[in-house]
């Protein structure tokens, strides 16, 4: 019976798709499109057709520009071409079948403008272009919008690269090691060097052995097989040593240059556990102020690029968390802005209001049949981001490891010190991560070690480590919803001239039959490198023993801490390999030869009221 029902559902689905599709599709592969400097970029075209011939009409174009091989765009191309669009997939400069030399995002503005101009001149083009893509491919959308390509009408950047110097590649001065991982893998995938079989094999071997390189940082030019792919080595060495937020990180800087961004309808898509979450919400604020055209924002409980999933890591958020049809909801947006159709945009979910968020944490905490924690949640429409009705509530760290909305009383022990040894950094267990393939786990995880954590394989909770200072509330008397932007404000000192301070917000589940040890669920985290504590524009070493204020910007979130749970904040000085490890020596970034332990001290008295600022939604 189940087989018959499944077959009927399949037939219904196929019939629905057949009714939806208006055209056949003809594919033209490896069309070489010349840029202004003569470099040609390989482009695949998916064109609406009837009876095997391209339809002699003009259509809007959906464009994707990607470094990950345009050949993987077939599902998208056939879907949209069958529904009255030309779909164009282009390998970015220096990647796969395209000519030229790859540079991280630098060429994607002018190349995008040239590509759009070429599309506009084609007989099948009506002159209107929308864009599609995730991560780097969302970044190429931002690049074209910042370059103001005349043909560009609308974009849907998902988990998109932007503001590279402030909370993404460099995060408050620390380097996000996912981009080290990206280079170590992609230098041997689709690069110029990889076209030579012997060189490609060497680079692939390097990528397969990257754990060993990871433990032998810093990376120095000419000392690893990466030297055989020089544009990748050059960028990575420079990026890991370039901490200041300056011209080096200018590409896709939207927050500081929203006025340069073309005023078009934009749909920003992000996830609470995505590596670009903080930039996605920051871009929404910047573009909303700068634009007359509508800017939409949707934030789900997702990891990077996983909008079709309702669970990740060790946690389930309920079936409603997923966007089941990632192509159809985009089609609705394109139909409205590229074809002028009067549809659900501005009227119904997920387009009813300009902000739509998933509020996590309303599940009952049982173990699902897949062995996951049922954290649950629900969708809610908002008028703005962050919600204006939220109350910024200060939760102060107490000398006994507690958290209270009252500052600590005068006590004999106004501080807590710990030793940070860069040789034994705190391991990363989940979080806002992308491109972590093989070295990091993404998303929501119990903050406990095990065989799934390569650098913390024992079944010990992170809270047992002496280099983590734990502050937590008593079990909550009522539910508390935290929705918005968060930060930790520390008063701290160090025995070193430079060090890091990290913070992690955790939803502590009490013990249950399904989880006898409880469940320490990571919600969000952040870091600050001490030399950048005052400004990202200039390095300023510390004086050992001097107390300084620090602000740790966490990634945004929306979570209900339920009655009986605890709100916990873990303070430490490393989170590896999410961030590079500070050697504590004050030497130039990515050029140290020494490593020393530091005694770092957190202060929590009335004069130095370290705390976390939580945006609490009134009951």
Image: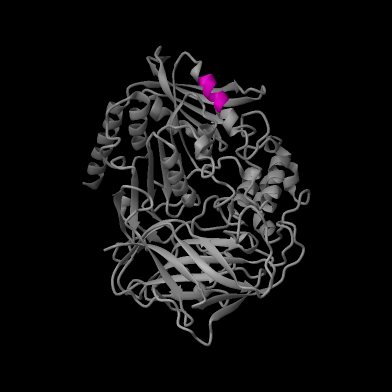
Q: Nearer the viewer, residue 271 or 346?
A: 346
Which residue shows up at 22% across the image and 43% down it?
5
Which residue shows up at 66% across the image and 75% down it?
545
In the figure, is residue 200 to the left or right of 492? Answer: right
**Number of numbered discs visible in the structure rendering:** 0
Residue 576, given in percent of the width and then of the height, sits at 59, 63
Which residue shows up at 64% across the image and 70% down it?
424
Q: Nearer the viewer, residue 332 or 296?
A: 296
The residue stretch that appears in magenta: 113-119
Residue 119, given in percent of the width and then of the height, sits at 50, 20
| Corner quadrant of residue 48 | top left
Which residue shows up at 48% across the image and 52% down it?
278
Q: Nearer the viewer, residue 331 or 454?
A: 331
Q: Nearer the viewer, residue 553 or 559?
A: 553
Q: Visible in this render: residue 448?
A: no
Residue 195, given in percent of the width and then of the height, sits at 68, 34
Q: Visible in this render: residue 124?
A: yes
Direction left: furthest residue: 1
Direction front: furthest residue: 607
Residue 28, given in percent of the width and then of the height, sits at 51, 21
- Residue 377 drawn above or below residue 141: below
In the figure, is residue 24 to the left or right of 187? Answer: left
| Corner quadrant of residue 501 | bottom right
Quadrant of the drawing holding the C terminus: bottom left
Is residue 548 on the magenta stretch? no
Coloring scheme used: one colour
- Residue 607 drawn above or below residue 48: below
In the figure, is residue 186 to the left or right of 49? Answer: right
Direction bottom: furthest residue: 412
- Residue 108 drawn above or below residue 5: above
The kind of secondary structure the magenta stretch mainly shows is helix
């Amino acid at each position: 019976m189940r087989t018959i029902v499944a077959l009927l559902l399949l037939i219904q689905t196929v019939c629905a798709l057949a009714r939806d599709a208006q055209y056949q599709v003809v594919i033209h592969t490896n069309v070489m499109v010349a840029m202004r400097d003569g470099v040609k970029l390989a482009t695949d075209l998916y064109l609406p057709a009837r009876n095997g011939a391209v339809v002699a009409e003009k259509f809007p174009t959906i464009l994707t520009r990607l470094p990950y091989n345009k050949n993987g765009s077939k599902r998208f191309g056939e879907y949209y071409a069958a529904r009255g669009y030309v779909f164009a997939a282009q390998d970015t400069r220096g990647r796969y079948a395209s000519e030229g030399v790859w540079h991280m995002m630098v060429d994607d503005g002018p190349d995008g403008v040239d590509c759009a101009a070429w599309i506009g001149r084609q007989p099948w083009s009506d002159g209107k272009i929308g864009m599609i893509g995730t991560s780097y491919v969302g970044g190429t959308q931002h690049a074209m919008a910042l370059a103001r390509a005349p043909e560009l009408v609308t974009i849907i950047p998902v988990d998109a690269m932007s503001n590279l110097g402030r909370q993404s590649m460099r995060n408050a001065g620390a380097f996000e090691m996912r981009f080290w991982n990206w280079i170590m893998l992609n230098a041997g995938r689709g690069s110029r060097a990889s076209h030579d079989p012997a060189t490609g094999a060497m680079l692939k071997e390097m990528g397969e052995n990257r754990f060993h390189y990871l433990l032998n940082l810093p990376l120095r030019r000419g000392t690893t097989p990466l030297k055989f792919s020089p544009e990748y080595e050059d960028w990575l060495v420079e990026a890991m040593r370039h901490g200041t937020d300056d011209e080096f990180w200018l590409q896709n800087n939207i927050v500081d240059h929203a006025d340069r961004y073309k005023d078009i309808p934009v749909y920003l898509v992000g996830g609470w556990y995505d590596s670009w979450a903080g930039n996605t919400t920051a871009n929404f604020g910047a573009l909303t102020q700068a634009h007359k055209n509508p800017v939409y924002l949707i934030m789900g409980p997702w990891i990077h690029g996983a909008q079709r999933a309702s669970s990740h890591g060790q946690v389930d958020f309920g079936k409603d968390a997923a966007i089941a049809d990632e192509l159809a909801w985009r089609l609705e947006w394109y139909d409205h802005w590229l074809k002028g159709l009067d549809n659900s945009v501005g009227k119904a979910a997920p387009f009813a209001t300009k902000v739509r968020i998933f509020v996590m944490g309303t599940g009952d905490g049982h173990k699902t049949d897949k062995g996951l924690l049922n954290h649950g949640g629900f969708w809610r429409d908002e008028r703005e981001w962050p919600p204006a009705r939220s109350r910024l509530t200060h939760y102060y760290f107490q000398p006994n490891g507690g958290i209270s909305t009252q500052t600590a009383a005068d006590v004999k022990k106004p501080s807590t010190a710990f030793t940070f040894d860069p040789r034994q950094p705190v391991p990363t267990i989940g979080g806002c991560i992308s491109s972590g393939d093989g070295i990091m786990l993404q998303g929501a995880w119990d903050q406990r070690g095990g065989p799934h954590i390569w650098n913390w394989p024992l079944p010990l909770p992170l809270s047992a480590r002496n280099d983590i200072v734990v502050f937590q509330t008593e079990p909550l008397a009522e539910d508390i919803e935290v929705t918005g932007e968060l930060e930790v404000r520390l008063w701290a000192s160090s025995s070193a001239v430079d060090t890091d301070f990290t913070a992690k917000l955790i939803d502590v589940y009490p013990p249950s039959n399904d989880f006898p040890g409880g469940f320490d669920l990571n919600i969000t985290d952040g870091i600050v490198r001490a030399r950048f504590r005052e400004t990202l524009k200039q390095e300023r070493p510390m004086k050992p023993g001097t107390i300084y204020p620090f602000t740790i910007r966490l990634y945004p979130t929306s979570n209900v801490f339920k009655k009986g749970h605890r709100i916990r904040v873990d303070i430490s000085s490393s989170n590896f390999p999410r961030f590079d490890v500070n050697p504590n020596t004050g030497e130039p970034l990515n050029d140290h030869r020494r490593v020393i332990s530091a005694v770092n001290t957190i202060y929590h008295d009335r004069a130095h009221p370290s705390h976390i600022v939580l945006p609490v939604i009134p009951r």
